Image (cartoon, rainbow, N blue to C red):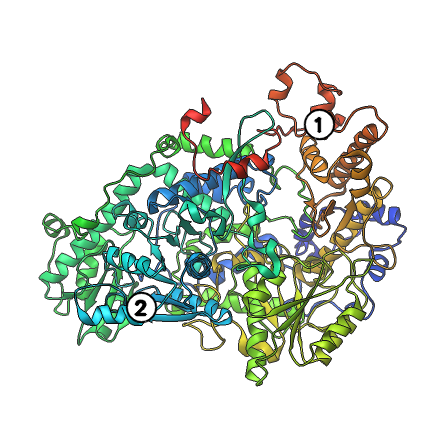
Amino acid sequence: MTQPRLAFDDLLQHTAFVSRHIGPGAKDQQSMLEALGYASIDALIKDVIPAAILLDAPLPLTGSAALNEVETLDALRVIAARNKVFKTYIGMGYYNCHTPTVILRNLLENPGWYTAYTPYQPEISQGRLEALLNFQTMVSDLTGMEIANASLLDEATAAAEAMTFCQRVSKSKSTTFFVSQDCFPQTIAVVRTRAVPLNINVVVGDHRTALNVTNATNATNATNAIDYFGILLQYPNLGGEIHDYSATVASAHSKDALVVVAADLLALTLLTPPGEFGADVAIGSSQRFGVPLGYGGPHAAYFATRDAHKRQMPGRVVGVSIDSRGDQAYRLAMQTREQHIRREKATSNICTAQVLLANIASMYAVYHGPQGLKTIAQRIHRLAATFAAGLTKCNNEVLTAHFFDTITVRTVGHTQAIHAAARAQSVNLRIVASDTVGVSFDETTTAADVEALWRIFSNRGDPGLSFASIEANADERIPATLRRTSDFLTHPVFNSHHSETQMMRYLRSLADKDLALDRTMIPLGSCTMKLNASTEMIPITWKEFSQIHPFAPLEQAQGYQQLISELEQMLCVCTGYDAVSLQPNAGSQGEYAGMLAIRAYHQSRGEGQRDICLIPSSAHGTNPATAHMAGMKVVVVRCDDNGNVDVADLRAKAQQHAGDLAALMVTYPSTHGVFEGAIREICDIIHGHGGQVYIDGANMNAMVGLCAPGHFGGDVSHLNLHKTFCIPHGGGGPGVGPIGVKSHLAPFLPGHGLLETGIAPVAATPWGSANILPISWAYITLMGARGLRQASQMAILNANYIAHRLAPQYPILYAGKNGIVAHECIIDLRLLKDKTGVTVEDVAKRLIDFGFHAPTMSFPVAGTLMIEPTESESKQEIDRFCAAMIAIRHEIQAVEEGRMTADNSPLRRAPHTALDLTEEWDRAYTREQAVFPVLNLKTTNKYWPPVGRVDNVYGDRNLVCSCPPMSDYE
C-alpha cells in the first residue's frame, strides 16, 4: 500500500522532542484511556479540571510552534554569542576557577548525579550522602568549626540565616544585629531584607571604631553605646584587607553576642580559621571550588558552627548511623529539626540545599587534596602580591596592606582611563569609587595576565615590568600572626584520589550506590521527577553562559538579558501573570518573595496592619514558615472530609479578620492531588475582604496549558523550575523559584543594586541561579504550546492510570467529584497498619528491592504514600511500578492471614542487600523472594542497595556529621 506523501514541514520534525519527553506513545495512551473508560484525553481532562477555569485555546507563546533539538541548540548558541566573556577581576565573592574535567564529565554532566532526589531515603542515597559528608568535613576543617551543614542557597542567604540563628542562640536581649561595612554589599542587602519583617535592627558600620574594646576612649564609648545580639564580619573583607578579629570577638562575647564570619574557603588554607579565633559561626560560598561563575549561580553556600548549637543550625545535615546489620551508613540527621516542619513556629523556610554544587566543591577538594588546595591558594596569593609590588614601582598607591587575593588601588585622576583601557582589552576590574579600583585574582590568572594589568594601570604607556623579576622579590602579604598553622583535610578521602583514574572510579562507585532517574522512575508526590533532557542540559557548560560574572556590565551580558526576558515572558504566558522575577533561587525563596510583595503592597496603600495569613491545614510546611518570616500571623483554615478547603470556615475566618487580612496561601491543584471546584469562589472571598491570593505553584505540572493561576484569581505564585520546567533536582538542589504576579504587585518584585525596579533582594545576585535558566528556556522552546499542554494532560493521565490499577489493592484517599485525581494520587495504608502492623516505611523500603525509589511518605497525610509519575514515564515503567505495589500488597496479605509475622516478613526486613544472602537464612521467606520478588528482576539490571535499613534513632542519638575515622571501617 502506498504511503501518503508527507508535507515537507512534517519531515523537519519540529515536534519530535515532544514524543521523546512524553513517555507513553499514542497506542499506550489509548490503552490507558480505555482502562479508565474514556474515549479521549480531552474527555478525561474535562472531568478533572473545573470547566470555569479550563483554557479553551493554546497558550499564546511567541513563536508557539516547537523547535527540534538541533534548532533549539542553534537558537541558544545565537543567544549565548551575545554574551562577552571578559577576563574578570571583579571578585566580591565570585571568582573564575577550573572545573576539573574528570568532575565535569563524571559528576556535573552525569545524570546519575544530577537527576537524583533529596536523600530522604538513605538506603538508595549512600553515594551522594557520602559526597555531602565530604563537603561537611571539608567546611568544618577549613573553618575550624565542629559541625557544618550540607549547604545553603548562596552566601547572602547564609548570612541572613546566621543572623536569625544568632538571635535564637544568643543570651542577649538586644534586637540589633551589627554588620561590618566591609562585608559584600549583596550580603548586607539580603540581611536587611530578612531583618525588616522580623523587627531586627541592622546597624552597618566600621567594626574597628564601633565594636572593638581598645585603649582608645572613643572606641570604648562606642562599644558601650551599641547593644547587639550578633555581628557579621568578612574575612578577607570586601577590599581584600585581612583583619585580626580576635579583639572584636572577645568584645562581642563579653556582651553575650555571637560572631559570624563570612570567610573565603580557599583563603582559609593559608589563614587562621574563624573557629580558632573564637567565631561562633562561619558562613560563605564554595563557588571557587570548581563551580563556574554562571552569572551568579547556582553555587553552594556553607554554614558551620559549634557542636553545642547543632540543633539550631539551618538547613540539612548528613550524619553517620548504622544499618540493620550494624554496619556504618549515612543519613540526613535530625530530620524533624528541619525548619519547615515547625510550620508557623519556624525561624526559616529553608527546605532544600545546593547538593549538586556542594558535591562538585567537595570533589574538587577530594581531587586536589589539602596540598593541592594550598598550592592553588599560594599561587593566587603570589600573583596578587607580585601585582601589588609592581604597582608600587609604577607609583600607584596600594591601599590594602594585608591581603590574600584582592587589593584596592588609589587611582586619583585616571580611574576612568584605567577602566576604559581594561575594557578595551576585554578585562573587567571592580568599580569601587571615582578614585579607587579593585582587583581580585583567582585560579585562572596567569603571569601574563599580571603583566597585562600593569600595562592597563600605567598611565605612561608600557611600564616595562617583568613578572619574573618582580615576583622574585615580592613579599608575602598575609600577616604572620594570621597564617594558618593547623592541619586540614587529613581524612584519607582527601588524600587518596588524586589521579584521574582514582577519581573517575571513586565517582563511579558513589553513583552506583544510588537510584536516580537514569535507572528508575522516581514517583515522589509533590516533587515532579520528570525528564531532564540532555539537550536542555548541554548549554549550561558553554563558556558564554558559565563564565560570566554576576556583576559584569550589562552590555557584556546581552545574551543573558535576552534569555531572561524571553523566559520571563514565557512564564507569564504559562501562568496568566503580568510580570515575573527569576531572582529567587529556590521554591522557598520564591514563596518568601511573594509574601514580601504582598506585604509591601499593603503598606503602599496605607494598610500595613494587614498581617493575617490564612493557610489550609493541608499546606506544605514551608507556607506557614514563609508567612512567619514575612512578619505575618498564621490562621489555619480547616479542610473537609474530602481534603478540600472548607469554604465555610474560610469565609468565616476571612470575615473575622477582614480588617487585618493580608493573604491566603493555597496550593492548586491541592496538596491532596485534586482540582478543587471552588477555587474561584475561594479567591473571590479573599479579595472581597481586602486580601491577596498566593497560589503555591508546587503542582504547576498539572496546569501548564490547561489552566492558569493568574486567570482564576491568583495575585502571585511561585513556580519550581526544578519541577515543572525541567531543571534537575541534583540530589537536593539546585532549584529556581521564580514568582509571577499580577500587574498591581509588579512594583514589589525583588530588586537589586543592579536593577532599577523592585524592592529588597532575596538572593545575592539579580537573577539568582542564572546559569541553569537555559534549561527551562530550552524545555519550553522544544515543547511549544501544544507540547506543554500535552505534557500536563499526560501527567494527569498517568496518575489516574496508577490510581485505577492500585485502587483494588489500596484505598485512594482523595479524588475529585468524578472520582478522578489530578497529577498525583494518595494511597492510604493506615487501615492495613492497624490490621497487620505493616507501616508505610516498610512499604517504602520494600520498593527498593524492586528497584524503585519510594513515593512521598506520610505527606500530606501521615500513614500514606503520595505518587506522582509525571508525563515522562512510559506505560511499561508505570506497569512495572504497579506490579511491584501489587506484589507488596500480597506480602501484606500474608501477614494479614497469619502466614508470617510483620517482624519476620520481607517488608520489615527490607531492603535486602547482597550481604544478606551470605548469612545463615532463618527467615519466613526465601532468598529468592527477598531479592527477586518479581521475575523480571532476574533479567534486568538489578539494583542492590549498599546498606540495609538505616537506624534513624541511633543516628540522632550518636550524632556524627563529618567523615568517620578509618578505624570505623576496619
Q: Amino acid at mark 1?
A: Leu
Q: Quadrant of the C terminus?
A: top left
Residue 200 in percent (x, y) is at 45, 69
Which of the two labelled residues, at mark 1 and mark 2, occupies the earlier sequence position?
2
Q: Is residue 737 left or right of residue 106?
A: right
Q: Which mark is residue 937?
A: 1
Distance between the alpha carbons at the discs numbered 1 and 2: 61 Å
Q: Amino acid at mark 2?
A: Gln
Q: Secondary structure at mark 2?
A: loop
Query: Depth-wise, is mark 1 or mark 2 nearer the camera?
Result: 2
Q: Quadrant of the N terminus?
A: top right
Question: Residue drawn at (36%, 52%), measured in percent from left and top?
Answer: 280
Q: Which mark is residue 836?
A: none
Above or below, 506 relative to 78: above
Residue 951 in percent (x, y) is at 59, 33
Q: Residues within 10 Å of mark 2 (few under 14, many from 20)?
A: some
Q: Residues within 10 Å of mark 1 (few under 14, many from 20)?
A: some
Residue behind mark 2:
181
Q: Can the viewer see residue 819 in this picture?
A: yes
Q: Is residue 141 left or right of residue 388?
A: right
Residue 394 in percent (x, y) is at 10, 64
Q: Are marks 1 and 2 in contact (CB under 8 Å)?
A: no
Front one among 151 and 838: 838
Above or below, 70 relative to 930: below
Residue 340 in percent (x, y) is at 59, 56
Front one among 105 and 889: 889
**Given the current orientation, which residue lies at the most extreme top position?**
920
Question: Residue drawn at (57%, 37%), measured in percent from left and top?
Answer: 125
Number of callouts in the render? 2
Q: Can the viewer see residue 1 in this picture?
A: no
Quarter of the rendering containing residue 436: bottom left
Q: Secondary structure at mark 1?
A: helix
